[in-house]
Image (tube, rainbow, N blue to C red):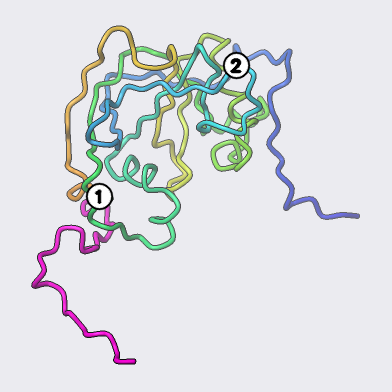
């Protein structure tokens, strides 16, 4: 008998799955955080091509003309999601990379219903914890499409690049691209401060160092 514990267990939703009883949580005007490039807006709803197979895009991206905008519960979650793999391995970032970003804050709309994939009852509808961490995005994107079709506002989940098991992020559904009506956002932290507050070491990479910070060594003679 083959041990299948190493196999991915999470599957896409069945075409006829009834999501009317799926666990939901309502947004209550709490604060969202998002780490982004300082020269770009935060409210961008990313989408995949309508005929894509899930090989591109983010975890819960919807297919065009719909899209998804990702927000976090805290500055640290927002920063670690943006810096991702390298910071998970080293817990460091070069100062130049940190200065490229800012963390913005926005207020969540009140009363919108999100699919809560961290709820203990979600497993009864076929959603396990793998949905939030698995590398094959075709499956979570299929669930996102199903949640959107069921009239839900997005997904409440726990992020891949943090160690929290409790929900700490929101995938917000909307029309792809920039909203027609501007949505408010404000700069909450500069990138360096946000990294330091998140316990990430910020390393000098020489990008802003003056010449006297370096020692010039003559090359060896032939």
- Which mark is on residue 60? none
Q: Total marks drawn?
A: 2
For disc 1, the neighbor class at 10 Å (few under 14, some 14 to 19, many from 20) is: many
Which residue is painted at 59% across and 36% down in the image?
Answer: 131
Can you identify the residue that label 2 sits on? 50
Give coordinates of residue 162: x percent, y percent.
Answer: 42, 48
- The residue that appears at 34% across and 42% down in the rendered structure is 77
Magenta: main secondary structure equals: loop
Indicate which disc, 2 or 1, sits on the residue closer to the N terminus.
2
Residue placed furthest toward the front: 222
| In the rendered image, the vertical position of residue 150 relative to residue 187, given as above or below | above
Q: Residue at x 27, y 41 (%)?
A: 75
Image coordinates for residue 121, horizontal then vertical, percent: 59, 28
Q: What segment is highlighted magenta in the picture? A: 195-222
Residue 37 is drawn in which quadrant? top left
> Tag 1, which secondary structure?
helix
Q: Residue at x 37, y 48 (%)?
A: 83
Which residue is more in the foreground, 190 or 167? 190
Nearer-the-camera pick, 145 or 181: 181
| Pointer 1 residue | 98
Image quarter of the N terminus: bottom right
């Amino acid at each position: 008998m083959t041990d299948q514990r190493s196999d991915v267990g999470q599957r896409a939703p069945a075409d006829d799955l009834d999501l009317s009883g799926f666990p939901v949580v309502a947004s209550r005007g709490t604060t969202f955080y998002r780490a982004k490039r300082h020269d770009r807006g935060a409210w961008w709803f990313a989408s995949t091509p309508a005929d894509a197979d899930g090989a591109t895009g983010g975890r819960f991206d919807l297919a065009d003309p719909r899209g998804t905008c990702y927000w976090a519960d805290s500055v640290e979650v927002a920063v670690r999601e943006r810096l991702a793999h390298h910071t998970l391995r080293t817990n460091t970032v070069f100062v130049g990379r940190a200065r490229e970003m800012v963390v913005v804050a926005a207020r969540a709309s009140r009363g919108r219903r999100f699919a809560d994939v961290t709820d203990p009852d979600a497993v009864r509808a076929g959603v396990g914890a793998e949905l939030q961490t698995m590398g094959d995005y075709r499956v979570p994107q299929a669930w996102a499409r199903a949640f959107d079709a069921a009239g839900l506002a997005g997904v409440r989940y726990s992020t891949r690049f943090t160690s929290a098991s409790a929900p700490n992020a929101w995938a917000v559904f909307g029309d792809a691209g920039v909203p027609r009506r501007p949505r408010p956002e404000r700069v909450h932290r500069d990138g360096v401060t946000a990294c330091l507050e998140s316990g990430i070491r910020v390393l000098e990479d020489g990008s802003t160092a003056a010449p006297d910070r370096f020692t010039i060594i003559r090359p060896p003679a032939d």
